[in-house]
Amino acid sequence: MNRPIEFRVWNGIEWIGIISAGNTPDTNDFNRWEDLVFCQYTGLKDKNDKKIFEGDILKETLHKNEFYYYTVEWGDDGWFLIMQDKSTNDWNIETAMNQEIESQPRMTYFYVGMEIVGNIFENKELLK
């Protein structure tokens, strides 16, 4: 997958911009870059054509009242989803979505119906 390398930047209060090649946010209000959280773009978009970044919370609706929540995480091998187990309210690694493996078409289909419903910084209530 060929994708732009972009990072959305969180300052602990709000999103202050997107960093990409030749584009950096205004960070004059902060003493150190270490105070910022950088969330990488996955290269994918949700069903509403919104870019999916690390830290986003996705919702997959299967039927009218059946749905699952996922958080987007970044690891050594790329991005992956952590799924909320509705029976225990635990969060479990679901699958590495960007690895070049035999079932890639299924994983792409798996993602297509998902929508961003928030992120881990502003919508902590969705993680409970």
Image (tube, grey):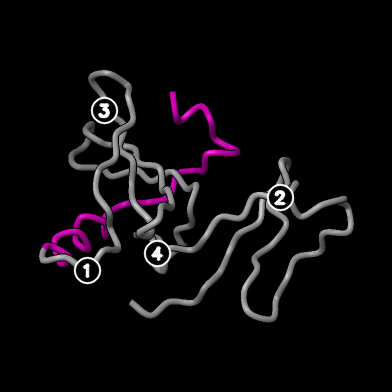
Q: Which mark is residue 36?
A: 2
Report x, y in % for residue 82: 33, 40
The range drawn in magenta is: 103-128
User: Mark 4 falls on what kind of element?
Assistant: strand
Instruction: Say which of marks 1 and 3 sits in front.
Output: 1
Q: CA distance from mark 1 to mark 2?
A: 31 Å
| Amino acid type of the residue that numbered disc 3 sits on in the rendered structure | Asp
Q: Is residue 73 above or below residue 26?
A: above
Q: Which comes before the other along the chain, label 1 or label 2?
A: 2
Q: Quadrant of residue 22?
A: bottom right
Camera-near label (4 vs 3) is 3
Q: CA distance from mark 4 to mark 3?
A: 24 Å
Q: Amino acid at mark 4?
A: Lys
SS assignment at label 1: loop
| Dot 2 or dot 3, earlier in sequence | 2
How far apart are labels 4 and 2 at the CA level? 24 Å
Pick the quarter of the image with the C terminus: top left
Q: Which residue is mark 3?
A: 85
Query: Label 2 is placed on what type of residue?
Result: Leu
How far apart are the two marked residues, 2 and 3, measured between alpha carbons?
30 Å
Crowding around mark 4 (Cα neighbors within 10 Å: few <14, some 14 to 19, many 20+) is: some
Asked if marks 2 and 3 touch (Cβ < 8 Å), the reply is: no
Which residue does the image show at 38% across and 60% down from the upper left?
A: 78
Q: Residue at x 59, y 39 (%)?
A: 121
Comparing labels 1 and 4, the label whose residue is closer to the camera: 1
- The answer to if 122 sits in the magenta stretch is yes
Question: Does label 1 or label 4 sit earlier along the sequence?
Answer: 4
Distance of label 1 from label 4 (alpha carbons):
19 Å
